[in-house]
Image: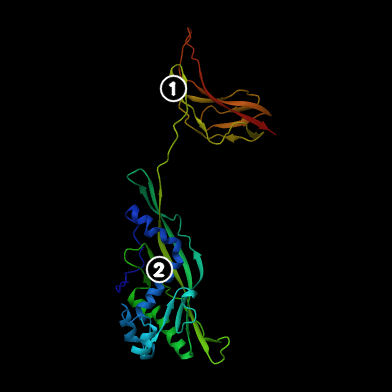
Amino acid sequence: MSNQPPLGYTLIPPPGTLKEAFTDYRMVDKAVTIVKSSIQKYIDSFLNPKGVNRQFLTASMSPVGLQFVTELTYDDQMKVSPNLRKTYLARFFAENIGRLPSILLIDTGVEFIDPGINDLVGAGMNVDGSWEGFLLSYMKVALSITTATLSEEDTSTLSTMLSIMFSQIATVLNNYVLHEEGSSWEVRLPLTGMTLGQASSVTIEGDTKTTVWTRALDLSCEFEGWIGIKQPPPVYAPPLMVTIGGVSKPIPTFINLSPNQEIPLGLSYPLLINGMLEQYYLGVSDPNVALVTSEPPYVLQPRAQGNALLLVIDRSVNSKSDIGTTSASYITDIPFIITR
């Protein structure tokens, strides 16, 4: 994690390649885990004596606060560094059962934020004809950072250190933004609204002499990331053809009208048709049952109950009679039913 503070809140640039979109960018569904992990690493950068931000804590905290460290093992604490105390920093309960002093990160809620008019922030065609798009994922993750020790003084010291890490020090260190180089996400710490609750104590069941003191720092972080998606080029089935006079012609496809579909009387029914050529027009086998507009937009107008055929006719010149009249060519039909 870099020590250099950014110049402000800036959107992370979209992925440049499809590989980026399908590796780092698919982790947005782990937003809560990413937020908790980044907070855990941020706290560890102070409490670990080898952490990149340890010097900020050394310059501002008392020696009492500096005794809480995260890199010791139990043997180290007992044999090598008796003045330092192993502090357990965990994101999940299972990682921290029965270990004190400890800091536990608990997520208390997620709020999905409307990104605005459109969450599509980038799109384009790939070289293979596929469509690639990048969607903005924006949400707020509420956290409760709970400190637990065996004394009220230690709990107060450790929780106060945490509040300073996320307030004054964060102003100078990272401008309230957590971001790892090369990642597609950004976690924003709250500028205001952090709450450091009162310390509370609880007696361990079966041990009346041991009391655990806890204190929670509540804050709401903003998570912003990118989702990369790819849609392959559409595959269209070749149109059905009909041969008239030795010439093959495509048969139109009815999108919203299936064979023997029932249409209520008195209701105009718009027709959606693919593959209508300029020389094609529509007709109805029984005008007493329904009428249809011959030119787009195509609308079927029921007139009476009954069955009829919707016809597709080609008006192009196929043959000419001796008197110069033109014969129309039948292309296809679809049956429909007008009901009450």
Position in image of residue 107 (x %, y %):
49, 71
Judged from the image, the secondary structure of the residue bearing numbered disc 1 is strand
Closer to the camera: disc 2 or disc 1? 1
Q: Residue furthest left?
A: 4
Residue at the (37%, 85%) spot, across then down: 75
**Who is closer to the viewer here, 61 or 46?**
46
Q: Residues within 10 Å of mark 2 (few under 14, many from 20)?
A: many
**Who is closer to the viewer here, 46 or 222?**
46
In the figure, residue 264 lies in which quadrant?
top right
Q: Residue furthest bottom?
A: 209
Residue at the (49%, 90%) spot, across then down: 152
Judged from the image, the secondary structure of the residue bearing numbered disc 2 is strand
Residue at the (37%, 77%) spot, across then down: 44
Q: Is residue 287 left or right of residue 272?
A: right
**Who is closer to the viewer here, 176 or 248?**
248
Q: Which residue is mark 1?
A: 248
Q: Is residue 49 left or right of residue 221?
A: left
Q: Amino acid at mark 1?
A: Ser
Q: Which residue is mark 2?
A: 187
Q: Amino acid at mark 2?
A: Val
Q: Mark 2 or mark 1: which comes first in sequence?
A: 2
Residue 230 in sight from this viewpoint: yes
Position in image of residue 185 (x %, y %):
38, 64
Q: Residue furthest right?
A: 340
Which quadrant does the C terminus fall into? top right
Q: Label 2 vs label 1: CA separation?
A: 61 Å
Residue 62 in sight from this viewpoint: no
